[in-house]
Image (cartoon, grey):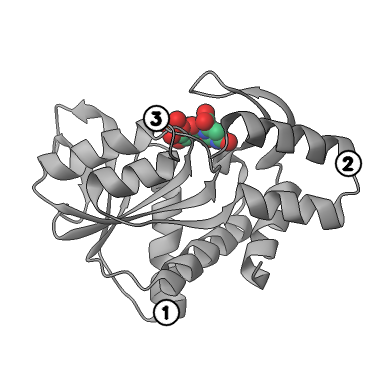
Amino acid sequence: MQPYQREFIELAIEHKALCFGEFTLKSGRKSPYFFNAGKFQTGAALAALGRFYAQAIENARVDYDLVFGPAYKGIPLATTTAVALADHHGRDLPYCFNRKEAKDHGEGGTLVGAPLQGRILVIDDVITAGTAIREVMAIINAAGATPAAVVIGLDRQERGQGEVSAIAEVEKSFGIPVISIINLGHIIQYLETESGDAAMVAQIKAYRETYGC
Ligand code: OMP
């Protein structure tokens, strides 16, 4: 685990963005942990988050023309990542996000920011079964742009619609890499060394046995 990945886990736990308990996921799965990117609620936390996303992107060496944040949670994530890419990596690139409801007055439409064109780097929170990210790909295709990569905070390493991982399905369907700051393995590794809560680690491992890949 790299230092920035450990710092990301520590920040997520500190802000209760990474929680342990019993949670029902969008897919209906009952999970002993949940990642809620909406819990990074201060300027400093968002700035750190942007640096972690930017670091993961730099490490992956992908080529892209625009940073895209899907509504709603992807919007602040893409914004802070675009700032961190410019401030820390010398990459001043356009960014854009969508609304969930089309605006029928003023400038209208569902897209805000730079024109959605070229190779698109999508910034999102989590992929579990891959439903949400497929909707994003439809937006990119409808605009005539090309997906370049998807970057998420946490790869839950779960099965998608078939037997392989949701991430592998997305990578195969759209021919793009999915980059993550951390995955479930990093969380388990962190908890095993730092938390001393063997029961919680056992629950998470049991969940991974059931839904992991
Ligand atoms: P999929 O559409 O199944 O890939 O689930 C992704 C979405 O689930 C995310 O965009 C979140 O809305 C939500 N989610 C989390 O935010 N954190 C989690 O730890 C798990 C989920 C989830 O419901 O699977």
| Along the viewing direction, whichever of 199 and 108 lies nearer the viewer | 199
Q: Of discs 1 and 2, which sits in the foreground?
A: 2
Could you tell whether 107 is left or right of 16 in the image?
A: left
Instruction: Inspect the image, locate mark 2, and give the three-letter code of the amino acid beneath it.
Output: Ala
Classify mark 2 as within 8 Å of ligand 1 or not, answering yes or no. no
Q: Nearer the viewer, residue 6 or 11?
A: 6
Residue 8, compared with residue 187, is above or below; it is below
Q: Which mark is residue 162?
A: 3
Contact between labelled residues 3 and 2, with CB atoms less than 8 Å apart: no
Residue indicated by mark 1: 89
Of label 2 and label 3, which has the lower sequence position? 3
> In which quarter of the view is residue 85 placed?
bottom left
Quarter containing the N terminus: bottom right
Which residue lies at the image location 52% right of the left edge and 37% below the top edge? 158
Q: What amino acid is labelled 3 in the image?
A: Gly
Give residue 17's position: percent from left, percent from top. 65, 42
**Residue found at the far front of this picture:** 163
* Category of crowding for the residue at label 2, using alpha-carbon neighbours closer than 10 angstroms: few (below 14), some (14–19), many (at least 20): few
Residue 52 located left or right of residue 193: left
- Which residue is disc 2 drawn over? 198
At mark 2, the secondary structure is helix
- Say few, some or many: other residues with alpha carbon within 10 Å of mark 1 (under 14 / 14 to 19 / 20 or more): few
Q: Type of residue at label 1? A: His
Mark 3 or mark 1, which has the lower sequence index? 1
Q: Circle 3 — which element?
A: loop
Between 48 and 121, the one lying in front of the other is 121
x, y percent for residue 119: 19, 60
Label 3 crowding class (10 Å Cα cut-off): few <14, some 14-19, many 20+? Answer: few
> Where's residue 84, x and y in %?
45, 69
Tell whether 21 sits left or right of 149: right
